[in-house]
Image (cartoon, coloured by chain):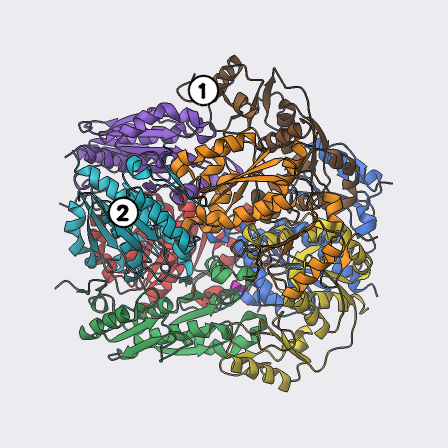
Chain colours: A yellow, B blue, C green, D brown, E orange, F cyan, G red, H purple
């Protein structure tokens, strides 16, 4: 058995869920609609627990703003808790992508939005949740200072997601990315700009294994 | 109790170990030797389990090449397993920094060096270890392709550490950093260039909680 | 004889096919449709073996997605084999541009798509072809790790084409470009981002001379 | 009267103190020692209130670590209060340059060092001072998150000074600079990397006029 | 009392005006129209003196070109004078954003537009105003040389706003930003590219406290 | 007389033609149509020899592709010769902008297009003209190698104009700009990317004074 | 048999010469002298045809300026011809590294140095050699215009090596790299900055297979 | 006659002075002392009017600070006037390189140093000279605002030389370079960072032809 399906234009990694505990996702950008459909069908035929399409066009009906479409057939039993904290209202699409991915992988998720450090007291309602979570995801653009503040508060692993919100010297997420990477808060690791999918994946892995024992 | 010691030139965060399970470390660059000494003494007087000095000058006798000095007084009981895989021989100092930090935080560490993808068969002896580890750290410079390859093989969380090895378009670690950040292997998060300290911290957190139950 | 046709707005290098074994191509971007037409006619009147228009507008009917139009009148007798391996489905337009250019220059081409390293086993069906090819072209975006992996496997020259697929820290192909340039796999050289035309040209030159003897 | 002294190699702006309330300073880098001496003498002969040499060589005896030398002959009567808060111990030279410049211009200065956000409680002793200051200067490297946190707490103008401390993705102060520039805390403006001189100048101007009435 | 309103998607910092003397503003980009409306209502219900929406869509009727909408209910009594000088006609939207913000915070504003240094005599009519202002804001794109020229003339604090006007090596405001940051005119601090909102905020703070006595 | 017209939104430098021998031009981007009209009328009323609008919208009828509109009322008597050589057909708009500006300033212009170095023999017909010209303007994108080749052939001053043609690593003209700036051909100076206006201005100045005697 | 030697700190790819026709080389930077010695011994014990150490310290006696040391025990029978053309005298170390590597792999090499395009006639003596070569390597810094000129003349594959010679906007080889990547001469592929080793490897592969038949 | 001398390691362009009116210069960096000597001898033997060595080591006795050595045997009769204006004292080495090169090519040079715009009145003594010069060279680092100010005052062609003076966001001359390139003063063209040699060359060409008649 090859472990993948050869569709000619694509080799669908049908072995990934077995090997890595999480099915491949479909990045819609650069793919034709019929290609996306064919890949999704191949995954479902090979018993993927779920299929998630990211960066989908406007016709994505599960969540248009986050540009997500998904089919959840066999989500694993829920284990572990991921806490998501975001810096501003505009980070919502990335919050959604992170949450959906983590939930499809079988994790509980709690979300606190718009807790940026320009008004630190807004972070207070999130403290209890981020302290009891098995993994914390911080989603923030511009200066991304929230990642360092949260990173200095908790004992759990922290995953930072820089976002492309902001203008000028925010440089489409580069400032947030550099800020997170050079954060003085140890225990923080970073994924790509706007990469809710990647953050949801590693956060779910961490959270699910944390209670596995 | 303020939770820190005020030395005038420094406010030592003596509360950090209680709050985050890991003591503050001392980045030697930009600090005078007597300042480093004073901070270390303050930490030990306030019962830090260990003190780790990174980027120390040549007189660091614990490990001169990795520029590390440390005092390990009360390392926690060992839990969990971190597997470190590096791309090349020149990545050794970062490997050491990661390993020492993780061990000081109470984790077992297994190391496989020089397993770069230009000769993929050299990765084979590492497969068993990276599959049984609670967290895998990939340390690589230049194209950092090893991170994507390892990231596609395992179910555990993967932490990537881009290194500044290489010349020309390696740009002091920038190529490796960008490569890891845009890796198509989900489940991978990245720390700063050459940041073995940060990688060791988050890897130990993940690994220790993985078996916590 | 000047070796070119002066159309006023353009000096068509009608001598290039004789001098370099391959006719000039027409990059459509920045040119008016009637200019493209006039250049093509001049080339055909001066007996170009083929005319290839790249980055053409939507009315390109030979291949709309790759934005290619072409006329193949006198393709040379086929010699040599080029193997193309791509990292993902979204790289298809660049794959097509590379393949068409190489075929127009008189080379056989075999293509393996979507063999990215996040699922290395998907590369296996390509192994035989890349080992027997006279030149291998690796087309990949994001981390472009595939180039290093392939570059470490074969004895033939490898040409890397970084693509602009991906988002965030992929930076429109810059990450892939830097990754390929700093690859630890010797024997790999790189062309411009998305430059299937350039890759097809040099690959065909290498492959055709390999069997010339 | 020309308003400057022409030394041939330099035109010393002896009118600046009258025009702008602050004498010109001497950036030592790129100047020969005898040139620095000649400029200083010209300033003193034209009754400058003080002469400050920045980035001086090791023989600067006023403050070797901050590379400062100065002569204070006629410092104006002290007015206003500037509060300086720094992120880490390594920022000390920039703290000193800011403090000395502001004091030479006739302002009181209070300093709180090593209050980085990775241990937010260390900022608490500074709160009272930053709330009563006429201008707050935040000096921080790496992610410079401290600037946003302080910027969200006070009503006074805040001047940020990114520093070149840190390694890797700190990029010699660029990350700190971008972070400060894209801070979500309004009321914050930024000077050049490590530019304690500029920060001291504008802070003193703001603080002195704040109580001028 | 929490000091903020939790709308689920947003935590409106209703305490900010009390804490910092200036209400939060609403950056429209990335927010849905109904979200903007809800935030504005929450601010008004909690007695914000004014509500300012920046980067609004075309339906902003207060000032479409500057993309501003605002409600001014309780502007503080006017104190202090801010002088705005701009380099070119195209900087108008940023001039407007700076002026409106400063006026909403209770400051008088005088504006001199199109005084770029390529024709220095055009700056003359502004001299009297910039010399009597409590704070000067210089708004300029391209080389932003105007900031250095003005910065060398006045004794008041100068705030620079680089703008994204220009093409080619203007790089969307980066040239202007770097030019302002490395200006040899001390006493100048800089805000983000096109950030009239930030400039208006800090300028109003400086100007209002200058006459406070 | 102030030497400028104050239109409120603009201060038209009506003295420039007297002072510098060339009237101000109007960069249309960022200006409203009525503003452009008002500036043009003010210039003409103050006896500008010509009015040139660059980067105009599609309704520019003098030359739509180069986005130019102009009124030539009092072009000075023609003196001197400027030779323009361009690398490719796509550089046409910049060629036109350079030519029109230089002609409006009273210089003869001769143009050779599409003489890129990939087919060096296409440069031959231009040799005679570039050798007799008083100033040579080289307009090229991508690698801009033509500037170095021409720069090594002639004794006249050479002005390079990098253009934004090309894709991928051409980076919108940055590659061409860097290539020209680091050219080993002495006697070459460079203007902004796509800045035909600037090139036409300095070239006309050089050429007109060359024959002035 | 694993195909590599595990030295603990290194896994020497002893299978590479069989698999890829060329032995691994040793990049000295970042390795201790005893490590370099141990790797070299392991390679020789496993019958490597040659051992090449690049970026060696001053004690490299085979070629100090190019920082090369090597042992040539079993160089393959010479086949094919590589022509190297360099832009300037300062490119000599990269020329040497390219030549030595290609010769160790069993290829004839002919070298033409200092043929930069600022004096195109200096290229003439090289024409015959580059026309008969099986592969041409162009080594140039600064604007690297030589690569485009040569790339437009020959029918053989061309490998470009940007060098770090030059200052200012040469940016350590970045200008040369970008220039080569965006060259309009098709049939040109590029290796890393100063990477003579990589260029020698791919050039030898191309040249040796060209006459294999 | 080939028009060059082949020294093996170098092909000295002995035809350049005839072809371009100015002899080749020798950039010392990257060349061995004996190579520099051999090139100089070859030039003198072939009757170069002068030999100029730039970036020479400390043993350069003509001007150590500017790192220049030269032999002037047959400087052409002086024609035309170049005016050099520099922004600060630290720009002296570049001023010297520009002046020496221009004088060796047979032009009169007048120099005004340290006339930066932070004290605009210091520019006044230079006004008369820059108005009567045939070409003006502006040499400035940091924000390089001086180039725009001078560029707006004169009718002669202006050549800008960005210098690497300054720190932080001056980025080794990049800020000055970008500022000059995006200057709103038309009639200004720019050479490489610190490239006094290039500026002296083009300025002398312009100035000498200006009075040639």
Give the x, y percent position of residue F17.
29, 39
Q: Look at the image and say whether residue B25 sits in the magenta stretch.
A: no
Q: Callout 1: few (<14), some (14-19), or many (20+) C-alpha neighbours within 10 Å?
A: some
Q: Residue furthest top?
A: D45
Residue F11, above or below G153: above
Q: Residue furthest bottom?
A: A45
Quarter occupied by the C terminus of chain H: top left
Q: Please name the residue that numbered disc 2 is placed on.
A: F50
Residue H153 lies in what quarter of the image? top left
Give the x, y percent position of residue E24.
68, 51
- Residue G146 located left or right of residue E114: left
Give me the disc on residue D4. Answer: 1
Circle 1 sits in a helix, a strand or a loop, which is it? loop
Q: Look at the image and say whether residue B114 sits in the magenta stretch.
A: yes
Looking at the rendered image, the disc whose residue lies closer to the viewer, 2 or 1, is 2
Residue C76 lies in what quarter of the image? bottom left
Chain letter of the residue beneath label 2 in the structure image: F
Give the x, y percent position of residue F16.
32, 38
For the magenta stretch, what is the residue range?
B113-118
Question: How far apart are the alpha carbons under marks 2 and 1?
Answer: 41 Å
Chain letter of the residue beneath label 1 in the structure image: D
């Amino acid at each position: 058995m090859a472990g993948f399906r050869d569709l000619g234009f694509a080799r669908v990694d049908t072995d990934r869920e077995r090997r890595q505990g999480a099915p491949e996702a479909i990045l819609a950008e650069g793919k034709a609609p019929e290609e996306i459909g064919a890949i999704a069908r191949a995954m479902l035929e090979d018993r993927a627990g779920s299929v998630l399409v990211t960066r989908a066009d406007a016709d994505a009906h599960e969540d248009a703003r986050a540009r997500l479409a998904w089919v959840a057939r066999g989500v694993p039993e829920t284990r572990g808790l991921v806490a998501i904290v975001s810096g501003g209202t505009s980070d919502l699409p990335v919050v959604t992508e992170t949450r959906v991915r983590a939930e499809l992988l079988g994790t509980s998720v709690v979300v606190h939005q718009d807790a940026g450090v320009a008004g630190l007291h807004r972070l207070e309602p999130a403290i209890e949740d981020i302290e009891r979570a098995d993994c914390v995801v911080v989603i923030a653009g511009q200066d991304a200072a929230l990642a360092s503040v949260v990173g200095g508060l908790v004992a759990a692993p922290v995953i930072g997601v820089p976002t492309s919100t902001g203008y000028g010297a925010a440089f489409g997420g580069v400032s947030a990315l550099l800020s997170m990477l050079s954060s003085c808060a140890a225990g923080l690791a970073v994924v790509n700009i706007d990469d809710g999918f990647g953050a949801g994946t590693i956060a779910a892995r961490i959270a699910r294994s944390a209670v596995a024992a």
